[in-house]
Amino acid sequence: MKRIFSGVQPTGNLHLGNYLGAIRNFVPLQDDYDCIYCVVDMHAITVWQDPKVLKANTREVAAAYLAAGIDPKRCIIFNQSQVAAHAELAWIFNCVARLGWLNRMTQFKEKAGKHRENASVGLYAYPNLMAADILAYKATHVPVGEDQKQHLELTRDIAQKFNSDFKVDFFPLLEPLILGTATRVMSLRDGTKKMSKSDPSDYSRITMTDDADAIAKKIRKATSDPDLLPGREVLDGTGAVPEAARQARPEAYNLLAIYAALADKPMADVMDEFAGAQFSHFKAVLTDLAVAALGPIGAEMKHLSDDPGAVDAVLHDGAERARAIAEPILAEVYDIVGFLRP
Ligand code: AQP
């Protein structure tokens, strides 16, 4: 059976990158896979979270899943801390993963920055918990944005080492699913930085609950450059933007990629449409598209925020179904490792 697992951290400011790089891609997968979509609250506390805000943000991510079109009857939607198997398996993986592997993780280096000595141990061991999230369900496919690719490679390494250390063929080796044309949405203020929840500038990101006015203002103020928009002749043989071209005009290619993803069109077609256009014209059309795509989702998220009980019921039901899958897998792991459970 092909099983999907993916998660989003409830750290607030859910944005267009989270939507295009992850949540939107979760929706069609429910037709072909057994899907588990998690709100990874245990990952969130690797950096400080206000407890009340964390609860609200957990409901917000669940509401985003539902509003984007994930069906809680066909898929499992739950928050990570309700299923103890994640933490239990993560401990075992803390003992399987090597320090050298974690030392290579670029996200830890970026997030810990200059204050490495003051970062939580949880932030450092985050990829081991992520491996546990996926392997507690023996998931085979994981849809994520490009920034998570390195963590998924580590999950494969952990699965492989566990299988080889204990001479078993127990954990599957997952396939990352990095889908769509906006696998790495960049900041609207600086096209060389990833759009992120923690950027101090609100104008760096469009959030999933921004209304039409906010979306219009943020796109209008988005950094651009003095040139006209490029045509498809810039693209390489595979239809991708060459790195040198991207580095020369990061904001232009970011906005074009966002348009392509929202319109569900190849980049080349979008470049045919706007070759030689001024940013002012392109930004107006992009605004209409973004409002049309995000407006109904944001409205439904707000509607769901008025009924926290309904969202909690989805999470409760999802957690029960998740436990039913994860607990027998964990019991087998305990047996393989040699833990006595008389
Ligand atoms: N800019 C992005 N472009 C495409 N995909 C993205 N994702 C995140 N940012 C982008 C994808 O969204 C999913 C959930 O991410 P997350 O919330 O678990 O963690 P994150 O990647 O750390 O998100 P942020 O926004 O960058 O948060 P901060 O600022 O706290 O670091 C993942 O599949 C991710 O790839």
Image (cartoon, grey):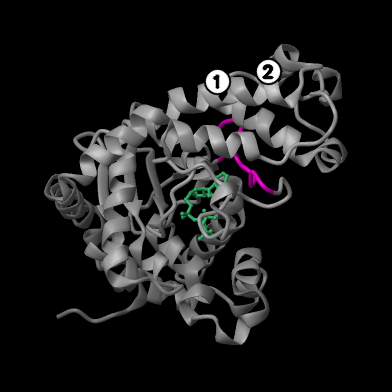
Q: Which residue is drawn at 73% across and 33% down?
A: 253
The part of the image, by quadrant, that contains residue 248 is top right
Q: Viewed as shown, does residue 26 lie left or right of 75?
A: right
* Magenta-drawn segment: 178-189
Mark 2 residue crowding within 10 angstroms, few (<14) / some (14–19) / many (20+) = some
Instruction: Read off the residue under disc 2.
Output: 270
Q: Do the residues labelled 1 and 2 touch (CB within 8 Å)?
A: yes
Seen from the viewer's position, the closer of residues 341 and 34 is 34
Front position in the image: 260 or 30: 260
Among the two numbered marks 1 and 2 on one chain, the one whose residue lies closer to the N terminus: 1
Where is residue 246? Give x, y as percent.
80, 38
**Quarter-of-image position of residue 331:** bottom left
In the depicted view, which residue is nearer to us: 291 or 262?
Answer: 291
How packed mark 1 is, by other alpha carbons closer than 10 Å (few <14, some 14-19, many 20 or more), is some
Indicate if the residue with disc 2 has its beta carbon within 8 Å of ligand 1.
no
Amino acid type at circle 1 is Ala
Query: Could you tell me residue 299's position as x and y percent?
Result: 31, 33
**Kind of residue sitting beneath label 2:** Val
Could you tell me what secondary structure mostly forms the magenta stretch?
loop
Q: Kindly report the distance in space between the C-alpha atoms of the residues bearing marks 1 and 2.
A: 9 Å
Along the horizontal axis of the image, is 163 left or right of 55? right
| Number of the label disc, if any, that sits on residue 263 | 1
Quick check: 87 above or below 281?
below
Q: Where is residue 166 in the image (x, y as percent from the top left)?
A: 45, 70
Q: Quadrant location of the N terminus?
A: top left
The local secondary structure at tag 2 comes to helix
